[in-house]
Amino acid sequence: MSLSFHNITFTHDGAPFPLLEDVSAHFDAGWTGVVGANGTGKTTVLQLAAGLLEAEAGNIIRAGHMVICPQRTDHAPEMLADFLTAMEPEAFALRGRLGIGEDWAARWFTLSHGERKRAQIGTALWRDPDVLLIDEATNHIDADARSQLIDALRRFHGVGIIVSHDREVLDILCSQCLFLHPPDAVMRPGSYTQAAAEAQREAESAYEERQQLQTQLVRLKQESRTRHSKASQADRKRSKRGLARGDSDGRAKLDLARVTGKDGQAGRLARQLDGRIAQLEEKVAAVETHAQRVPQFWLEGSCSPRRVLFTLPSGEIDLGESRILSFPSLTMQRNDRIAITGGNGLGKSTFIRHILRELQIEEQHLVYLPQEIDLEQTRRIMSDVRALPNDLLGHVYTIVSTLGSDPKRLLQNDDASPGELRKILLALGVVRHPHLIVMDEPTNHLDLPAVECLEQALRDCPCGLLLVSHDMRFLSNVATTKWQLTQNGSTVSIAEELI
């Protein structure tokens, strides 16, 4: 079993430049992570590997049985029904390990996205491939299911390639990571954290080198202007145009200077310097930097003048199916950073919506990012963004750019991807001087660079944060308190704890 890319070039139809150019990579047994910003070609790499796309140059060497798990889970995976009825011990073990129900094929469209993903990956593992390709394994999956999924993937001993924004998954599984910076791709050894740290060191070193080269370039250009000025003055001095016809001595001196070469020295020095400048400009252009440098996100006024954002009296919410969510009296201060955590189906999003109904914060100072947004809402949001005044639109551009997307390209398209739409919504919220930001699964659909930029931005956030997420690394970096949901019988209760 093996998989290798050799000098692969690929360009999407209608694109002006290749997405991948002369890319070579070898995928060993074990897991390789594929990482990069939105639009850099992560899914394309998987589709090329699986033969779903054809490279325009180069070749891909495949050996062994291959299975791909796409990012979307709209349709049940091939052979799901066979997996659910299989009687061999490995099928029983996988179904139990991943909590997969026997009736999931029959009620596919009633399953949560997390349940569908577990069924998709469980079916793929049961098929025992030599090469397994997975696009976003942990979207929508709660902590318990995520742990079970990681355990199942660790037991896979073939060639595995995984696209994920989940850093902990990449750190646990991967022994190497392919970093995409179109049209280039660089394979680095180690877990994601190790490989990303090395990539950042390389980028910072390249940034410093570029800064030094640019400083030299400025100095040389200044010297070039001085030398060209001297050469121009020398040209005027040796010109015979201003001499009288009878001034034979003056003409003789100029002729002698030309013979000895003294008259052209300034010009030669200027031309030599032009050559050095051209070489230095080539060096500057050749030095690529990908260092992450996050500008200031937050505007003045992004903090409530009131000490308390809200106090929620104790109460109960009907969750349906004879279940209730019972919660104590809860208070949120203006600088609090609160995470709402718990398993799938316990009512976290329902609780968020209840809080939003009870809030008494002016709408312009409240930012809410829901878990999912349909296409009609997406188009309306994109239309509203384009209608913003130029000063606010410029700030939106800055934030979206910081999060790794080209804002001008993004705003030309009404059908933004879920990850790109989250960047737009965050930017729109920031320019409104928020007093409270509420996010339901903020890292879903975001690429890794955007997740890390979001973390850095939220660390400096002066307003209140209320976050629902299964990404515990993200929460531990930005939140200080959690409201933990747990179920006992038909009652879901909430307990407040420090992170």
Image (cartoon, rainbow, N blue to C red):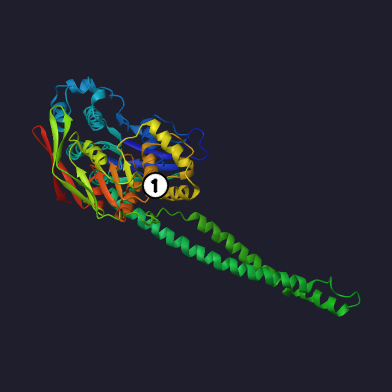
| Figure disc tally | 1
Q: Position of residue 149 (x, y in %)?
A: 20, 36
Can residue 258 be seen here?
no
Give whichever of 474, 291 is nearer the camera: 474
From this view, report whether residue 300 is shown above or below residue 316.
Answer: below
- Reading the image, the residue beneath label 1 is 427
Few, some or many C-alpha atoms within 10 Å of disc 1 (few <14, some 14-19, many ≥20)? many
From this view, report whether residue 25 is shown above or below residue 490.
Answer: below
Give whichever of 104, 318 is nearer the camera: 318
With 221 as the anchor, is 486 left or right in this view?
A: left
Q: Where is residue 333 in the image (x, y as percent from the top left)?
A: 23, 53
User: Can you name the residue that lies furthest to the right here?
Assistant: 246
**Residue at (16, 38) in percent of width and height:** 144
Q: Where is residue 36 in the image (x, y as percent from the top left)?
A: 37, 45
Label 1 sits on what residue type?
Answer: Ala
Label 1's element? Answer: helix
Can residue 202 be seen here?
yes
Choose top left, top right, bottom left or bottom right for residue 295.
Answer: bottom left
Give the position of the N terminus as an image quadrant.
top left
User: Can you name the residue that lies furthest to the left here?
Assistant: 489
**Residue at (62, 63) in percent of width and height:** 274
**Residue at (77, 74) in percent of width and height:** 237
From this view, report whether residue 207 is shown above or below residue 179.
Answer: below
Give whichever of 305, 116 is nearer the camera: 305
Q: Position of residue 323 (x, y in %)?
A: 13, 31
Choose top left, top right, bottom left or bottom right for residue 67.
Answer: top left
